[in-house]
Amino acid sequence: MAGQSKDTFKLFNNTNVFSYEKPIRLLTYILSIVNTQDSLILDFFSGSATTAHAVMKLNAEDGGKRKYIMVQIPEKTPEGSEARKAGYDTICEIGKERIRRAGRQIKEELGLLGDDLDIGFRVLRLDSSNMKEVYFEPGKVSQASLFSQVDSVEEGRTPLDLVFGCMVDWGVELSLPIRREEVAGKELFVVNDGALVACFEEEIPLETIRYIAGLSPQRLIFRESSFATDADKLNVYERFKQLCSWSEEESYRNIRVI
């Protein structure tokens, strides 16, 4: 297990999945020097996510509320390595699993005192835009390409992909809680109790719109396919103006149709 700490070696059931990691004791010491319990720690070379482990450990020790952002390219693990044999094809997968295992271990060591310790994390992957490239030179526009722009969303994108893309565009924190709800048979995504509400269903009924308005939303997202006609889309803007007491400017600023 050359190059791997004893703690991580045990964490992965005595398997050497990552070599030459950062010492967790050193990182914990460095973080403690900062002496702020609500810091946001960024590690651009996350590796096996030792920094995330250290943040959770320090929070467990002093009751801090530190957060972390780990950044790691999906570098492949070596062919024939212990990591590859254990099912970890990339370093990112090792890091994610380490955070899960380290969090469980820390909570178990704390016993009842660990009930309030937040060990949750969210995994996001950098990708191209959710929206299709819609800019063409006039001479390259065809009837087929015009019909393809009826839906401007790239194929294969999930509703959550669209939600997170809009959160980035609007500057909404990506760590905020998101819950799914179903109202009148239509699926909603509610970010932080109304900081953003998204519905990508077709033919959204008035009951669903009234429910959304009752959440006092700050921002709303729909898809072009949610509306059968332009008149239906304009009607939604008018309804939210009335239900949320928005001005016309606020209505067009707070509602996005993609």
Image (cartoon, rainbow, N blue to C red):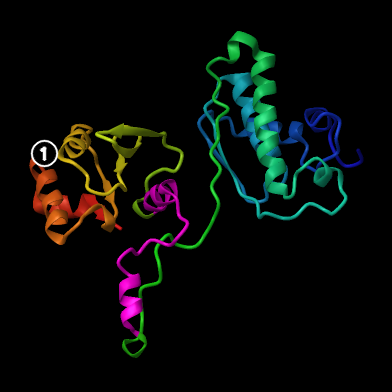
Residue 133 is situated, as x and y percent measured from the top left of the image, at 40, 71
Please say whether residue 170 is one of the residues in the magenta stretch.
Answer: no
Query: Can you say whether 46 is above or below 127 in the image?
Result: above
Identify the residue shown where x is 38% and y is 61%.
Answer: 153
Q: On the rendered structure, is 240 left or right of 132? A: left
Query: Can you say whether 108 is above or below 49 in the image?
Result: above
Q: Is residue 20 visible?
A: no
Query: Can you say whether 77 is above or below 214 in the image?
Result: below
Quadrant showing the N terminus: top right
Comparing 135 with 169, the one in front is 135
**Amino acid of disc 1:** Leu
Q: Which residue is mark 1?
A: 243
Quadrant showing the C terminus: bottom left
Comparing 251 with 117, the one in front is 251
Comparing 124 with 137, the one in front is 137
Identify the residue shown where x is 19% and y is 39%.
Answer: 209
Q: Is residue 213 visible?
A: yes
Q: Please give the range of residues in magenta.
A: 141-168
Comparing 99 with 207, the one in front is 207
Residue at the outermost right position: 2
Residue 35 is situated, as x and y percent measured from the top left of the image, at 58, 30
Identify the residue shown where x is 30% and y is 44%.
Answer: 199
Residue 113 is situated, as x and y percent measured from the top left of the image, at 59, 11
Residue at the outermost top position: 112
Q: On the rendered structure, is 77 left or right of 211? A: right
Location of residue 152 by image quarter: bottom left
Please say whether residue 166 is one of the residues in the magenta stretch.
Answer: yes
Query: Can you say whether 132 is above or below 98 in the image?
Result: below
Identify the residue shown where x is 33% and y is 63%.
Answer: 151
